[in-house]
Image (cartoon, rainbow, N blue to C red):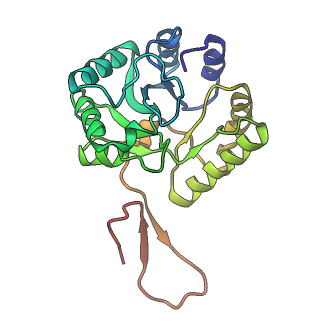
Amino acid sequence: MGSQLNAGLLALQLPGAITYAFLPHTPHSRNLANAAHHLNKEVMLHLPMQAMGANKLGPGGLTLNMSRSQFSRTFLSDLKAIPHVVGINNHMGSLLTRHPGHMKWLMEEIKQHDNLYFIDSRTTHHTVANQLARESKIPSRQRDVFLDDDPSPQAITKQFELLLKKANKNGSAIGIGHPYKNTLTILSQLIPQLKDQNIKLVPASQLVYQAPIIRLAIENNLTPGPLVLKTTNKNRTYQ
């Protein structure tokens, strides 16, 4: 959010604990971030990073050809541009997030500020951003579902259903969407239905800082044996 005022104001009217991510140095980002904070909504910096294609990066973008000092100055300028920031996620970044050196720089910058978390938007399967965040001891998660790569109402509804399916399976899930007209309409209709489905909408920080989710796997018609605990930590096996 931040480039369009009307779309941003409509997005702020969505019910529930939506977390809003703002692009730095855009015309309406500061005012909209202040409004989100006033509404007790969580605010993130939507940090522009270089993509593989020719997509325009916009102001405050981090690029592969930056020196360490240029990278640091740009990051600090971006962070100061958005008030009330508690977390960061990447805008684009399909090129930059696959480079461990630059992601290490980013995590070093984030660690200079207390209580900032990071969410990897996963704009490429080759991203190492979440891995580097974890190695740097920065609270982090990664995106599970993009809601509106296809902005048609049918596709957004389908992706929202996929988000709920992942949440039911894994205990939680993170979805990312844009302030598109169809996205806002679909979310305004479906979010109020979450309570009836025993699903709770929470700020991104609650998922980032919570303990790993462990589920007890119970299946019918199985011969009694060891209980198996499923965990999101792939490096551990429990029996």
Q: Residue at x 65, y 44 (%)?
A: 195
Q: Residue at x 60, y 21 (%)?
A: 12
Q: Quadrant of residue 15?
A: top right
Q: Is residue 211 above or below residue 72?
A: below
Can residue 198 be spotted in the picture? Answer: no
Tell me which corner region of the image, top left, top right, bottom left or bottom right, holds residue 221: bottom right
Image point 24% across, 29% down: which residue? 109
Instruction: Name the residue at 21% across, 22% down.
Output: 69
Residue 64 visible within the image = yes
159 vs 216, nearest the viewer: 159
The x, y position of residue 35, in whole percent, is 52, 13
Q: Say if 102 sits above or below 145 in the image.
A: above
Toward the viewer: 225 or 76?
Answer: 76
Residue closer to the observer: 108 or 65: 65
Quarter of the N terminus within the rendering: top right
Q: How many marks?
A: 0
Q: Position of residue 22 (x, y in %)?
A: 48, 21
Whether 197 is drawn above or below 5: the answer is: below
Q: Quadrant of residue 139?
A: top left
176 on left or right of 86? right
Q: Is residue 205 left or right of residue 66?
A: right
Most extreme residue toward the bottom is: 223
The spot of residue 232 in percent (x, y) is 41, 60
Q: Which residue is at the front of the view, 179 or 51?
A: 51
Image quadrant occupied by the C terminus: bottom left
